[in-house]
Amino acid sequence: MASTLSRAIGSFPNRFDPGGMSALPEHLQETIRRRDEVLGPGYLLMYREPVEFVSGYGAHLIDHEGNDYLDAYNNVPCVGHAHPRVVEAVSWQMAAVNTNTRYVQEALVDYAERLLATFPQELSKLSLACSGSEANDLAMRVARYHTGGEGIIVTRWAYHGITREVSSFSPTLGTGSPLGPNVRLIDPPDPRLAAPGSTLAEHMRSQVRGAIDDLERHGFRLAALVTDCAYSSDGIFTDPVGYMKGVVEEVHAAGGVYIADEVQSGFARLGDSMWGFSRHGVVPDIVTMGKPMGNGVPLSGVVFRPEVSEEFGRNVRYFNTFAGSSIPVAAGAAVLDVFEEENVQQRVLENGNALRAGLEEITRESSYVAEVRGSGLYVAVEIVKDNDTLEPDRARAEEFINDMRNRRVLISGTAKGANVLKIRPPLAFSTADVARFLETFAEVAKVRL
Ligand code: PMP
């Protein structure tokens, strides 16, 4: 028990206090005790009163007692929890055969063609992996190989994954996980950070230029700029768009490549596009994707411009046992089927707009809300001590998240100050779900905002 408690205290949003623990049903308390006995280091539980689910559908999760929770947090089950189309495709494939990429698989080729058709034509090569971290790891290996450089630029509070290489450019992992000497940090695209009289585009470009200069001064040529196109861990910054053009010009002028991390922003999360980068009118050199790609079946991918991956492909073997095997590919293809059949992107756009409009209405008068921002079904509500100083109010955000959970609506928090409510439901979120969400949010806002 002691170690779960000590890991959880100080983490966000799981301030795990014994008060919350004793309010839980006995069997859950027992599972948590046993979990602590057997799991390795670093695990956290969400919410002051952690919760276990036994089934789900659409954007809904059901606990042991049959209570229905509204899921406004999980992006992996993008087309919905236990979507029958995905369940059927995976079950069928599992009962038939599972082979890897060393065998001819027509279904893999079909999937690659369909997925690549959603990208600009310059991006025409697909490699598969099993997680976002693996995808970013491969992307960076290829970027280093292609450019001959080592320098990496990421945003100040970025997260890109867990491998040794990728954690070295994931500052959000904190001081226990050191950044590489070849890594430089820039501000996320928050218009409020641009100096008076300067545009966001100028601010971003000059930061990238400064980071490149500093890398070169320390003997590192640039390999890559990597950005999460939703800047999720930085606090969610999706708009305004358009500043990336100058940024990418700087990166190319220094001999580097631009890697767009679409693990969060991809698969129509932002509503007005399938991929976050395309909102900015740029074509990256490499794109990585993951989480929603297999609706819960481990599946991730890297898309390249052929000229960037060619030499690596000639000289380095790539075999990744499970990646591209028949079962995850069946899941990925079923997700694309649902996108077409249910017109998912349009639904995200409409329900996302309604969600943000409702949140703006509810929070308009509150001095504790600096901004409601986001795009599609990726929405941030920034909680501050007061609207003049914009000082993050972590404690208030934490109370808000736990109050929502206690009313059976699941959200979480993000940003360095842990003060930004992160609302990121499955893309199956319906108009009825939006209404239930706003009703609950308004109830909590009456108390907390
Ligand atoms: N990139 C981004 C932007 C992410 O948010 C994450 C996961 N939170 C990853 C990469 C890593 O993905 P995974 O957990 O599948 O390794």
Image (cartoon, helix red, strand yellow):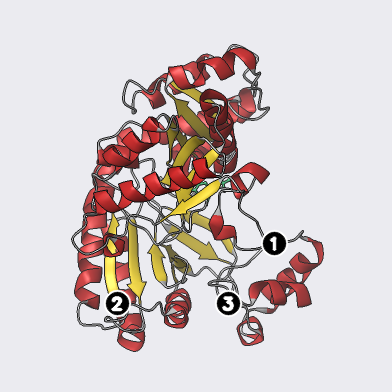
Residue at image position (37%, 51%) is 207
Give the left or right position of residue 269, taking residue 333 as reference.
left
Q: Which of 371 and 272 is in front in this view?
A: 371
Q: Can residue 205 be seen in this view?
A: yes
Q: Is mark 2 within 8 Å of ligand 1?
A: no
Read off the residue under disc 1: 42
State the image coordinates of residue 312 (x, y, percent, origin top left). Answer: 58, 19
The local secondary structure at tag 2 comes to strand
Q: Does the residue labelled 3 lie within 8 Å of ligand 1?
A: no
Going by the numbered disc 1, the residue's amino acid type is: Gly
Residue at image position (52%, 24%) is 146
State the image coordinates of residue 181 (x, y, percent, origin top left). Answer: 61, 48
Label 3, label 2: how far apart the Cα atoms are? 25 Å
Q: Decide: few, some or many residues near mark 2? Use Cα within 10 Å; few <14, some 14-19, many ≥20.
A: many
Query: Split into 4 quadrants, where in the image is the C terminus?
Result: bottom left
Q: Which of 27 and 411 is in front in this view?
A: 411
N-term mark: 3 or 1: 1
The local secondary structure at tag 3 comes to loop
Going by the numbered disc 3, the residue's amino acid type is: Glu
N-term mark: 3 or 2: 3
Query: Split into 4 quadrants, where in the image is the N terminus?
Result: bottom right
Residue at image position (80%, 62%) is 38
N-term mark: 2 or 1: 1
Q: Which of marks 3 and 2 is in front?
A: 2
State the image coordinates of residue 245 (x, y, percent, origin top left). Answer: 27, 38
Q: Decide: few, some or many residues near mark 3? Use Cα within 10 Å; few <14, some 14-19, many ≥20.
A: many
Read off the residue under disc 3: 49
Read off the residue under disc 2: 369
